Image (spheres, grey):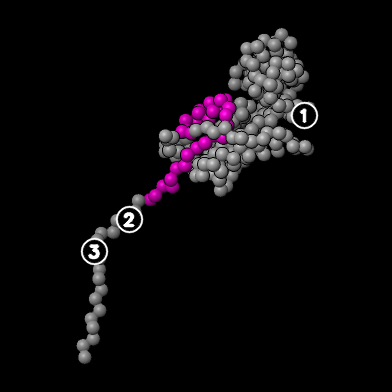
Amino acid sequence: MAWPSRTTIVDNTAFVPLAPQRAPAMSLILASGSPYRKAMLARLRLPFRTISPDVDESPREGETPAAMALRLSVAKALTVAERNPGAVVIGSDQVATFQGRKIGKPGGFEKAREQLLSFSGQTVEFHSALCVTDGRRQETRDVVTFCRFRQLSEEAIETYLRLEQPYDTAGSAKAESLGITLMDSMQSDDPTAIIGLPLIALSQMLRQFGIDPLIPGSVPAEG
């Protein structure tokens, strides 16, 4: 009896190896309504959009300035990330402290004047916190800046306040503009931290998420 033959089928189609696939780039969002932080992030020349987070920024009893800044930066980033799955979100917050007390935004002329008079010849500590998250993991950082204010006359303070109106700035000192003239010195690992968005630290953190301003296309253009 003849046994059925076994046939081996050979596909002679040439094997073409697949090109290595690059992980899809994600959109970048700044969780802030601050025009100052927006301008700072724009310096990295990355495409991004801004969304203002709805976060209660009230301090908690016994909370240190560093802990408060970190908590709020995380809350801002996660609030926006929850509504934008797949995006890399940057949250940031800044808290100033002077002689053991948290210093907030003055909100008006008299409070700002009072703050700056008390800072004259003294050192104020600014905690600039960052959180970067993609919704699955997060990186956080706190960058501290020590600002030594020069001896300030009432006339200099009042002139500065009329010109700058820094009432939405923690500690009343807008270091990105005339506020820099109020100071004798600054000490920080990141010179941009005082403005509220530490770009050295942020660049390091973004690279952990595959985003690098020096790698074209690491973030797709918006729109």
Q: What's the mark number on residue 12?
A: 3
Q: Nearer the viewer, residue 105 or 214?
A: 105
Characterize the local packing of mark 2: few (<14), some (14-19) or many (20 or more) Cα atoms within 10 angstroms: few
Identify the residue under disc 2: 17
Count of marks overlaid on the render: 3
**In the drawing, does residue 185 fall left or right of residue 15?**
right
Q: Is residue 36 above or below residue 76?
A: above
**Residue drawn at x 59%, y 35% as measured from the top left:** 53
Label 1 or label 2, whichever lies nearer to me, is 1
Q: Is residue 183 above or below residue 207?
A: above
**Residue drawn at x 52%, y 36% as measured from the top left:** 29
Q: Secondary structure at mark 1?
A: strand
Could you tell which of marks 3 and 2 lies nearer the N-terminus? 3
Label 3 or label 1, whichever lies nearer to me, is 1
Q: CA distance from mark 1 to mark 2?
A: 63 Å
Q: Where residue 148 appears, x then y in whole percent?
A: 71, 22
Identify the residue under disc 1: 101
